[in-house]
Image: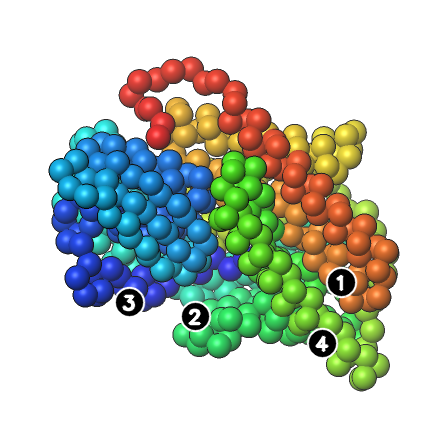
Amino acid sequence: MSQLSDTNITEQRSLDSIPNAPDRNKPIGFLLRLAKALHTYGLPAYELEQTMNGCAEALGYGIQCMSLPTSISMTILPPDNEPKTYLIRVAPGEINLDRLRKTTEVARHVIEEQINAEQGANLLKQIAKVQPDYPYWVIVIAFAVVSGCISRIFFGGLNEMAVSTLIGGVVGMIAVASKTRPMIDHLLPAICAFVATWMALWIDHHWQLQMTTSVVIISGLIILLPGLSLTIALTELATQNLVSGTARLSGTATTFIQLAFGSALGVELASRFGYHINQSGLSPVAPWSVFLAVAIASLALVPLFSARIRDTGWFLLAALTAFSVVHFATLSLGASLGAFAGAISVGLLARVVTHFFDVPGAMIMMPGFIILVPGTVGYRSILALVEKDVIAGLATAFEVGVIGISLVAGFLISSLVPLPKDASKDQY
C-alpha cells in the first residue's frame, strides 16, 4: 500500500497537454480537471461522484458522473447547449492527503459560491505544482519505522522488530526506486515479497535469531498490503458503485497474487539453500509497548500519506482510537465484531472532527482504517497456502471477508448517526 507522491506524473498527464481539451478556465474544463484531481489524490468513487454533483449544480450544470479506478466518465448537461460526454483515462492514484485536502477545499468553495470556475481552475493548477513535502530518505525511514512498529503490534520481540525494520527500509528503497522505473513499479509487490521473504529466511538461518519469520515478512511488507483498497472496494460495492467496486476488488486480488508469487518464489529458492520458515512461538509483550508502537507507527504514516506535520495529532488520535476500540472489543466480542466496533468509532470520529473542526474526514479515516483493515490477515492466508496448509489458508481467507464486511457495515452505520446542525459547516 505504498503512498509515495510523484509530482511529475501529475504534470505529464495534465489535460492541458491534450489537443482540443476544454479550456480549464471554463466551467466544463474546470469540472473535468477537478474530477481528475480528486481521483488522482485518492478520493473513493462514492465521495467523488457526490462532490462533482454538488460542484456542477453550483455552476448551473447538470452532470452524470461515474468514477472507476482507471477512468472517469462524465456527461455534462450545459444550460444552453447539447449534452456532451467526456472520458478521462487515469491511473489509480496514490493517496496524498495534503493535496486532497486542498482540492476538496476548492470544491467546497465552488459549492458555496465563494469562487468561480476560473479561480478554482487556477487553484487546482497551483496545487498540482506543489513540490513534495518530504524527501525520499524520509519516506524510506517511514517504511522502516512502520514495519518495526507493526512487528511489535503482532507481539514480535526485539529480534522480530529489528529485522522487520531492516526489511521495511529495503522495501521502502525499492518502492522509491520504482517511481522512475515503470517495469519495477508494475511488479513492485512481487519483487518486494521475494526480497522480504528471502531476507527474513537468510537472516534467521545465518544469525540463529529464533524469530517468527512469518511475522517479520508480514511486518516488512505492511505498507504494500492492499487492505485499505480492499475495504474501499467493499464500501463501493455496498454503496452500489458496483463497477468501481468490482474493478478495485480485482486490482486488490492482483496485488495479493503478486505478493503470493513473490513469497512462494522466495520460499522455494531459500529451501534449496536449506533455509526454512521458522514458526517459533511469540512471547507475551507488555500492553503499553504495543500502544506505544501504534502511536509511533501513526506518526510515521504522516509522510507516507503526504500529510502536513500539523496534522500529526489527528493521525495519532485516529490510530489510537481505532486500535483501542478493536483491542478491547475483540477481547469480549471476537475479531469480526471488534472490527465492526472499530469501524463505527473511526467513522463517528471522522464525522465529528469534520463537522466541528473543518478537517477532511480522510485525515481520520485513512490512518484509522490502516489499523483496522484486513490486509495482514489476507497475507497470512497467502503464507499458509505457500506453506501448503490449504485448510488454514482458506479459513484465514474467509476471515478476511468477514472482517472486511464488518468494517464496511460499521462505517455505513456510523454515517447514519445524526450530528448537531451547523449551517456554517454544511457538508457536501
Instruction: Specify the label residue 427 is tagged with.
Output: none
State how far apart marks 3 and 4 are (Cα). 36 Å
What separation in Å lies between label 1 and label 2 (alpha carbons)? 27 Å
Q: Which residue is mark 1?
A: 383
Mark toward the start of the polypeptide (2 vs 3)? 3
Residue 166's place in the image compared with 294, above or below, is below
- Residue beneath disc 2: 179
Q: Are marks 2 and 3 in contact (CB under 8 Å)?
A: no
Q: Nearer the viewer, mark 4 or mark 2?
A: 4
The numbered mark at residue 265 is 4
Q: Secondary structure at mark 4?
A: helix
Q: Earlier in the sequence, mark 4 or mark 2?
A: 2
Q: Residue furthest bottom?
A: 273
421 vs 4: above or below: above
Q: Residue at x 37, y 59 (%)?
A: 90
On residue 12, the disc is 3
Front-most of 237 and 131?
A: 237
